[in-house]
Image (tube, rainbow, N blue to C red):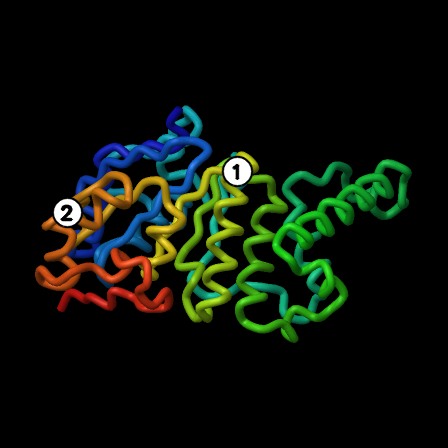
Amino acid sequence: MTILSLQGVTRRFGGLVAVDAVDLEVSAGGVTAVIGPNGAGKTTLFNLVSGFQTPDAGRIVFAGEDITGRRPEAIAASGLVRTFQLVQLFQNLSVLENIQVGCHLHTAGGVWSALLRSPRTRRAEQEVEARARELLAFVGLDAAAETEASALAYGQQRLLEIARSLAARPRLLLLDEPAAGLSVDETKRLSGVIRDIAARGTTVLLIEHDMKLVMNTADRIAVLDFGRKIAEGPPATVRENPAVVAAYLGGAPLEGANPDANPGANFGGTHA
């Protein structure tokens, strides 16, 4: 079953076509990766899907509804949630409080209920805290629940951001370069967390440069180059695709095709 469908999606910036008539089908319950050299249009594609930019042409359909041009908050409320390349946490709040903030989309009650501390409000708060602690345990941060977010190591902050995104109970989670800046061990842990998220029923769509993470985690890969989709398929097929190899390294073997390759190595390809 398809949970996200992009149909001829195009985005221009002046004379530059950042995303060029891209078609993409994301199957529910799995992990799909979007890869490509720097400047290939990956982040623009995420911005279009999540409502931070509007396509110049094409349609974006999520869970059977056309969401083209909807505002980001409306898209998030419908069950499509994203993270960003740069960690965006409430640094002065505790780890637990950061997760509780992420539960706001599904919190019942209004202003008067909150001010009067009604039984309904107290029950909702207890449910939110229980949900937050469950998510912290899921990503392995339960021991740091009362720690200020700013005191976490960078890899832990990445996991906290993912946990906070899950607090909104997304049907589709967009991860924008989640392994950026992580160590080899942190990347391995992240791969397991992503697979566990999908196993629990949340579809994952990710942008990532770390090819070992992609090859070990994704069920399906779409490749962008100069804004166009040049390949799509399972990892074993994509990494052997001549167009993909040429787009990255001019015909040299792809990093990540060797299971012993450095997990932290990125393609590093760019377009002038």
Among numbered discs 1 and 2, the one appearing first in the sequence = 1
Q: Nearer the viewer, residue 186 or 177?
A: 186
| Left or right: 226, with 170 as reference point | left
Q: Tag 1: residue type?
A: Ala
Q: Residues within 10 Å of mark 2 (few under 14, many from 20)?
A: some
Name the quadrant of the N terminus. Answer: top left
Residue ID at (81%, 46%): 125
Q: Nearer the viewer, residue 67 or 241?
A: 241
Q: Nearer the viewer, residue 113 or 227?
A: 227
Examine the rendered structure and indicate whether residue 101 appears above or below residue 24.
below
Residue ID at (71%, 48%): 134
Q: Residue furthest front?
A: 260
Q: Are marks 1 and 2 in contact (CB under 8 Å)?
A: no
Residue ID at (69%, 53%): 137
Q: Which residue is mark 2?
A: 241
Residue ID at (84%, 41%): 121
Image location (x, y in percent) of residue 161 = 56, 58
Q: Tag 2: residue type?
A: Asn
SS of the residue under disc 2: loop
| Left or right: 132, with 195 as reference point | right
Does residue 208 show up?
yes
SS of the residue under disc 1: helix
Image location (x, y in percent) of residue 150 = 63, 73
Q: Which mark is residue 151?
A: none
Residue 252 in which image quadrant: bottom left
Q: Which mark is residue 199?
A: 1
Q: CA distance from mark 1 to mark 2?
A: 28 Å
Examine the rendered structure and indicate whether residue 184 appears above or below residue 44.
below
Image location (x, y in percent) of residue 110 = 77, 40
